């Protein structure tokens, strides 16, 4: 999804910093976009690397106006089976990574007089599932962190919202998702570009009076409390 978001923002004329652990893929994506894109290596769990990424964005393109916190990992396991190491990894990437990202860009956005932060949570941040306990906990926490940050940063004209995708055609798509998706109110697995359209709207001035809110693109998965995931 991150690659789709980058292409979407670039197509709208934005200058984009692609920040990821996958250096070869990130560099290739940046070269394909051209001079309006820069790749910056980033482990989202490392505070100093977030500082380097924010500094690079400021130095090359000027003040940061939008942050999309998209990095995420999935480790399966109910609460009585998941390994503590997997629990810590999921929380470090999915939650602490978002926290560090917000901290890193907020000073630049304050100097610029405002901005928009879009935290990619999940439909799993809207209901409970036992099979992915760590992932569910992390995505609910991102939802809460979003609201807390929105309360604090709103006075600086920085909006903070969360986006909640359902089944998206990415390498993280779980086995059986294609079949399970047929039980949704809007059946099927969607292309990442569908979520990008939502992210672009939330980051844009068209959503200028929305903060601390959830924007859901899950085909109706959350309507039935996620039962499609267990079908």
Image (spheres, rainbow, N blue to C red):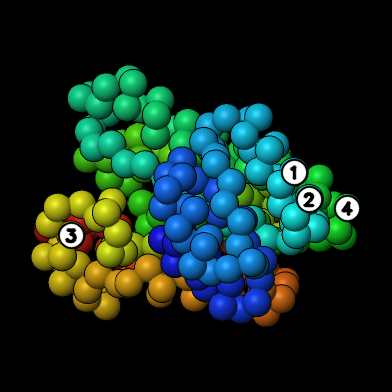
Residue 149 % position (x, y): 69, 46
Q: Are marks 1 and 2 in contact (CB under 8 Å)?
A: yes
Mark 3 vs mark 1, foreground winner is 1
Q: Earlier in the sequence, mark 4 or mark 3?
A: 4
Mark 1 → mark 2, Cα distance in angstroms:
6 Å
Mark 4 → mark 2, Cα distance in angstroms:
14 Å
Mark 4 vs mark 3, foreground winner is 4
At x 63% / y 50%, what residue is drawn?
147
- State which quarter of the image contains the N terminus: bottom left
Mark 4 vs mark 2, foreground winner is 2
Q: Is residue 32 left or right of residue 105?
A: left
Which element carries disc 2, helix, strand or loop?
A: helix
> Mark 1 highlights which residue?
55
> Mark 2 highlights which residue?
59
Q: Is residue 199 left or right of residue 36?
A: left
Residue 128 % position (x, y): 32, 46
Q: Earlier in the sequence, mark 4 or mark 2?
A: 2
At x 11% / y 65%, what residue is drawn?
179
Mark 1 → mark 4, Cα distance in angstroms:
13 Å
């Amino acid at each position: 999804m991150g690659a789709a978001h980058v292409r979407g923002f670039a197509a709208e004329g934005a200058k984009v910093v692609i920040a990821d652990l996958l250096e070869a893929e990130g560099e290739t994506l940046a070269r394909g976009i051209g001079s309006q894109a820069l790749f910056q290596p980033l482990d989202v769990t490392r505070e100093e690397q977030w500082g380097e990424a924010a500094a690079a964005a400021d130095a090359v393109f000027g003040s940061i106006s939008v942050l999309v916190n998209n990095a995420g990992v999935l480790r399966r396991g109910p609460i009585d089976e998941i390994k503590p190491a997997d629990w810590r990894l999921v929380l470090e990437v999915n939650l602490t990574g978002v926290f560090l990202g917000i901290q890193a860009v907020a000073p630049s956005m304050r100097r610029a007089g405002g901005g928009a932060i879009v935290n990619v949570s999940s439909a799993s941040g809207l209901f409970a599932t036992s099979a992915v306990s760590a992932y569910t906990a992390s995505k609910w926490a991102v939802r809460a962190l979003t609201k807390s940050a929105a309360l604090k940063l709103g006075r600086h004209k920085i909006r903070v919202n969360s986006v909640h995708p359902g089944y998206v055609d990415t390498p993280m798509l779980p086995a059986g998702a294609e079949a399970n998706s047929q039980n949704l109110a809007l059946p099927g697995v969607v292309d990442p570009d569908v979520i990008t359209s939502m992210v672009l709207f939330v980051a844009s001035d068209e959503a200028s009076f929305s903060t601390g809110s959830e924007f859901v693109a899950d085909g109706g998965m959350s309507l039935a409390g996620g039962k499609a995931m267990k079908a």
